[in-house]
């Protein structure tokens, strides 16, 4: 856990980690230069439970704090948690079993949002579906993800990853490491005004768009300049005309029709959201039906 000024939530988060049914764990809390009472709270936990260890450093950013914790960790598996999220009791135990049975390197799960939002994020489950989902949004939550230890030790977080840290890391790992999401809700993801994604909205959106285009080049290296520009339009927020939607539909059929059924279903899901941006409801429905038939028949 990397934390900077986490007084409001860190007690509840630490309690959820120490309550795991998989009890053989160590919790390394890397305090990234907090100026509130975070360190005192963590020291209190460390005095009561020897599995908790506080690492102190000056404020240098989340990525460097995470890398310090990774270097210090001794376990065969490494799990991240943000200071404001919560783990369900069987989170680690269930993922270790799933990773072992399926020879996985990285395993996430579904998550429940709470606080200023209330819903469930059902991430794609298979590796191929995760690859295609990453074209449109981040298909994992780091607080819900378990890694084989060597994966993170050999691939530290880039210090330049100020926002979208988990997406940056995932795109680096996907070509080489087998990844999946367990279809169970094992983590609660807190939404609140002071979290970084809400404080740095514009920067996060800009970086997300960059990463999407980077991933397209990786996943579909044969895409030409016109196709890349069209995809950039598809993942934007501007209203789309009928001609643009038809060209995007052609692009999706031509470049994004994976042999994997779940991957195709995820692309169709995002296509349906995309056509909702059309002002012509009747034409949008026709395009929606067309891609459903091309992808899911």
Image (cartoon, helix red, strand yellow):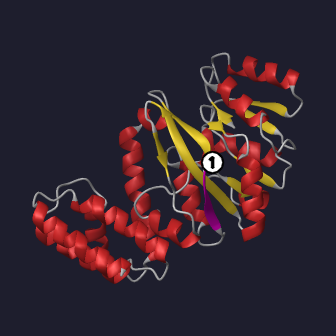
What residue do we see at 30% from left, 79% from top? 293
Q: Quadrant of residue 256?
A: bottom left
Quadrant of the rendered image containing residue 223: bottom left
Specify whether residue 218 is in view.
no
Q: Residue at x 35, y 68 (%)?
A: 268
Q: What is the count of numbered marks?
A: 1
Residue 193 picture location, percent across and down: 44, 27
Instruction: Name the one closer to the observer, 52 or 213.
Output: 52
Nearest to the observer: residue 253 or residue 118: 118
Q: Residue furthest front?
A: 297
Expressed as whole percent of the image width and height from the top left, the position of residue 161 reads: 54, 48
Q: Is residue 257 above or below residue 77?
A: below
Dominant secondary structure of the magenta stretch?
A: strand
Left or right: 49, with 7 as reference point: right
Say whether residue 89 is left or right of residue 294.
Answer: right
Task: Describe the element under mark 1 as helix, strand or loop.
Answer: helix
Question: Vertical placement of 215 versus 236: above or below?
Answer: below
The residue lying furthest to the right in this view is 50
Q: Residues within 10 Å of mark 1 (few under 14, many from 20)?
A: many
Q: Which residue is mark 1?
A: 144
Indicate yes or no whether the magenta region holds residue 181: yes
- Region rendered in magenta: 179-185
Residue 32 in percent (x, y) is at 66, 31
């Amino acid at each position: 856990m990397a934390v900077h000024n986490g007084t409001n939530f860190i007690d509840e988060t630490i309690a959820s980690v120490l309550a795991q049914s998989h009890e053989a764990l160590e919790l390394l809390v890397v305090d990234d230069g907090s100026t509130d009472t975070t360190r005192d709270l963590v020291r209190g936990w460390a005095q009561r439970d020897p599995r908790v260890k506080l690492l102190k450093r000056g404020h240098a950013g989340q990525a460097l704090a995470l890398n310090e914790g990774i270097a210090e960790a001794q376990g065969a598996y490494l799990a991240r948690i943000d200071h404001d999220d919560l783990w369900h009791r069987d989170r680690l135990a269930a993922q270790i079993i799933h990773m072992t049975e399926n020879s996985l390197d990285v395993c996430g799960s579904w998550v429940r949002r709470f606080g200023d939002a209330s819903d469930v994020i059902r991430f794609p489950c298979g590796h191929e579906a995760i690859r295609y989902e990453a074209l449109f949004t981040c298909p994992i939550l780091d607080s819900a993800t378990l890694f084989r230890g060597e994966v993170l030790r050999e691939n530290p977080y880039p210090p330049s990853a100020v926002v979208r840290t988990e997406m940056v890391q995932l795109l680096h790992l996907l070509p080489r490491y087998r990844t999946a999401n367990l279809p169970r809700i094992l983590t609660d993801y807190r939404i609140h005004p002071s979290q970084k994604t809400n404080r740095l909205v514009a920067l996060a959106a800009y970086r997300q768009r960059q990463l999407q285009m980077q991933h397209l080049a990786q996943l579909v290296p044969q895409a030409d300049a016109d196709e890349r520009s069209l995809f950039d339009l598809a993942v934007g927020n501007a209203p789309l005309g009928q001609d643009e939607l038809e060209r995007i539909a052609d692009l999706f059929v031509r470049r994004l029709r994976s042999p994997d059924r779940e991957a195709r279903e995820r692309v169709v899901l995002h296509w349906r959201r995309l056509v909702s941006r059309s002002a012509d409801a009747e034409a949008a429905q026709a395009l929606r039906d067309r891609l459903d038939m091309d992808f899911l028949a």
